[in-house]
């Protein structure tokens, strides 16, 4: 008897369940094992953490596949030069960063791919190309001015008006050539699944300054990944945290208990599960967070969460007899069904490799408002993609060996007009940051670095409160 209860006690410590089968109170429950949730868990100073993940694997919007010995991303493909928390994390996890070999960028227009020193030749005149370079300088200046606001939490001061200026408005006030405006729109759709009208210049200057290609620097690469792609990062994190993750567990709601603790209700294999925690970190996309937290945060906070819109997105990886794209790692396409195509094999083969390969196309809707975009059939996606790829690579349709389509309902949060003040309202809401914490890319910026920084900041807040 004594032996049995001791064993039960031991098991309860290991599995974090009490002897009678009821879950014990966790110090922290994290909803979602995407990058932000994994980062929070990694930096929390308590061991008593449980991560509840709806899917059978971690990584969220970092998803990959494998074909013919190659890894291919179906979502996140790269990161900028690692800095700050991301850099620290990569060092801690002992991961080797790979620089994607240059030339990395190309521009596709009317069936021609422009790269290297001629990357701006899609623009009709020298005057237009000079305007492109001038725009680059202007955006870099704006980026330097706003970087601290976006990434370091500095006061917005003089830039507050930019929060209400769309990229489209800013470009037209600066009398930018329509084809350059088109290029920026394609970049924005590809990077954020939202168009120039929908994004605010406050959040966009940063990404555009980094993204606009320069004919002078085409041999420099500013894009990085890992041996098997970005999935190496989420895999390394989830392996470290494996014992704390419960997969296949979809959280339905979070409720405040009379004793001040939080009750987390989830569904797993058709069964209802009830968990208890002192703190809950919700890292799902905002619309899901709004549903989960409907009973536990203020109506004001719910209202703000409801304003965070997401664009839809489709990616397709096409497996081919030979390698078709060699001119650049990625080509932004100005007049096609897709906004960009990628040579997936670039970091996994030699420069002159010509064998079986993978080319991917990234396909956002033309507006984040379109909520039916992902309903197209796989076959439609393939046919529309190949039809437009034929302009660049005649004969590619005949070399197709297979394909893989991935859909994203919540691809990217739209950092639209007034987003800065929306985030301020969430930051300052009295129902948040005590027991319930909102975390994820939408709380910082819609890239890997943003998700990681958000996860890290939340871990710091929670560590302080648990001390
Ligand atoms: C197609 C595409 C390409 C991209 N490419 C890049 C890129 O190259 N570089 C870059 O920096 N960024 C890129 N991004 C953006 C980047 O992927 C995201 O910013 C980042 O991964 C977001 O991480 P997150 O943790 O905030 O959210 P997510 O990754 O969405 O994680 C949320 C997690 O919560 C889980 N979840 C949802 N609901 C529930 C529930 N009810 N219960 C339990 N769990 C739940 C989800 O399954 C998921 O695992 C891309 C995004 C997309 C869509």
Image (spheres, helix red, strand yellow):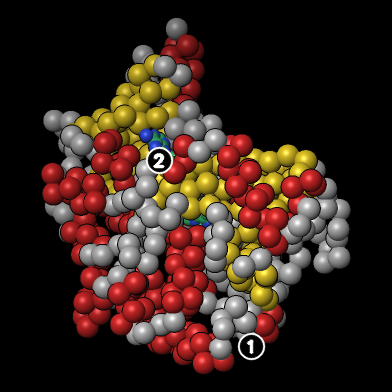
The residue sitting at 21% across, 32% down in the picture is: 255
x and y, in percent, of residue 177 in the image: 44, 81
x and y, in percent, of residue 378 in the image: 58, 37
**Quadrant location of the N terminus?**
top left
Q: Earlier in the sequence, mark 2 or mark 1?
A: 1
Image-based side of 155 in relation to 105, left or right = left
Image-based side of 360 in relation to 456, left or right = right
The residue sitting at 52% across, 46% down in the picture is: 314
**Is the residue 147 above or below the residue 377 in the image?**
below
Quick one: label 1, few (<14), some, or many (20+) residues within 10 Å?
Answer: few
Residue 174 appears anywhere in the view: yes
Quick one: label 2, few (<14), some, or many (20+) residues within 10 Å?
Answer: few
Q: Nearer the viewer, mark 2 or mark 1?
A: 2
Most foreground residue, 450 or 139: 139
The residue sitting at 66% across, 59% down in the picture is: 342
Residue behind mark 1: 216
Residue 229 appears anywhere in the view: no
Residue behind mark 2: 372
State the image quarter where residue 278 is shown: top left
Instruction: Give the tally of numbered discs.
Output: 2
**Is the residue 232 above or below the residue 165 in the image?**
above
x and y, in percent, of residue 273 in the image: 36, 21
Q: CA distance from mark 2 to mark 1?
A: 41 Å
């Amino acid at each position: 008897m004594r032996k049995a209860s001791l064993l039960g006690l031991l098991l309860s410590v290991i599995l974090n369940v009490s002897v009678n089968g009821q879950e014990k109170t966790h110090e922290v429950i994290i909803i979602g094992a995407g990058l932000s949730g994994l980062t929070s868990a990694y930096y929390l100073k308590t061991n008593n953490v449980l991560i509840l993940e709806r899917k059978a694997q971690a990584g969220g919007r970092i998803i990959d596949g494998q074909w013919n010995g190659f890894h291919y991303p179906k979502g996140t493909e790269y990161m900028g030069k690692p800095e700050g928390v991301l850099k620290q994390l990569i060092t801690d996890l002992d991961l080797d960063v790979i620089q994607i070999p240059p030339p990395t960028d190309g521009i596709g227009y009317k069936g021609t791919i422009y790269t290297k020193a001629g990357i701006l030749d899609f623009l009709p005149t020298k005057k237009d190309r000079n305007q492109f370079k001038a725009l680059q300088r202007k955006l870099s200046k704006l980026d330097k001015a706003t970087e601290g606001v976006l990434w370091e939490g500095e006061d917005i001061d003089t830039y507050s008006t930019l929060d209400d200026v769309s990229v489209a408005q800013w470009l037209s006030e600066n009398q930018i050539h329509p084809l350059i405006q088109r290029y920026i729109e394609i970049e924005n759709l590809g990077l954020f699944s939202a168009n120039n009208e929908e994004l605010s210049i406050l959040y966009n200057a940063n990404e555009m300054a980094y993204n606009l290609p320069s004919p002078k620097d085409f041999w420099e690469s500013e894009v990085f990944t890992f041996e098997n792609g970005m999935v190496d990062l989420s895999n390394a994190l989830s392996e470290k945290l494996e014992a704390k993750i419960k997969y296949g567990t979809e959280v339905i709601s979070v409720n405040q208990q009379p004793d001040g603790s939080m009750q987390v209700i989830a569904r797993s294999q058709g069964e209802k599960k009830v968990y208890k925690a002192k703190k809950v970190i919700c890292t799902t996309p905002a619309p899901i967070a709004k549903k989960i937290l409907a009973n536990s945060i203020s109506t004001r906070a719910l209202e703000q969460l409801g304003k965070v819109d997401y664009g839809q997105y489709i990616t397709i990886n096409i497996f081919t007899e030979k390698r078709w794209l060699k001119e650049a790692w990625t080509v932004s396409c100005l007049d096609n069904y897709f906004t960009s195509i990628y040579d997936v094999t670039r970091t996994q083969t030699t420069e002159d490799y010509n064998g079986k390969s993978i080319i991917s196309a990234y396909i956002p809707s033309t507006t984040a408002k379109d909520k039916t975009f992902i309903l197209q059939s796989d076959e439609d996606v393939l046919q529309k993609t190949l039809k437009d790829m034929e302009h660049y690579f005649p004969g590619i349709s005949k070399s197709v060996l297979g394909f893989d389509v991935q859909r994203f309902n919540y691809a990217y949060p739209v950092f639209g007009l007034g987003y800065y003040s929306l985030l301020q309202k969430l930051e300052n809401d009295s129902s948040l940051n005590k027991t319930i914490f909102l975390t994820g890319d939408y709380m910082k910026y819609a890239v890997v670095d943003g998700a990681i920084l958000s996860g890290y900041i939340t871990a710091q807040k929670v560590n302080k409160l648990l001390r």
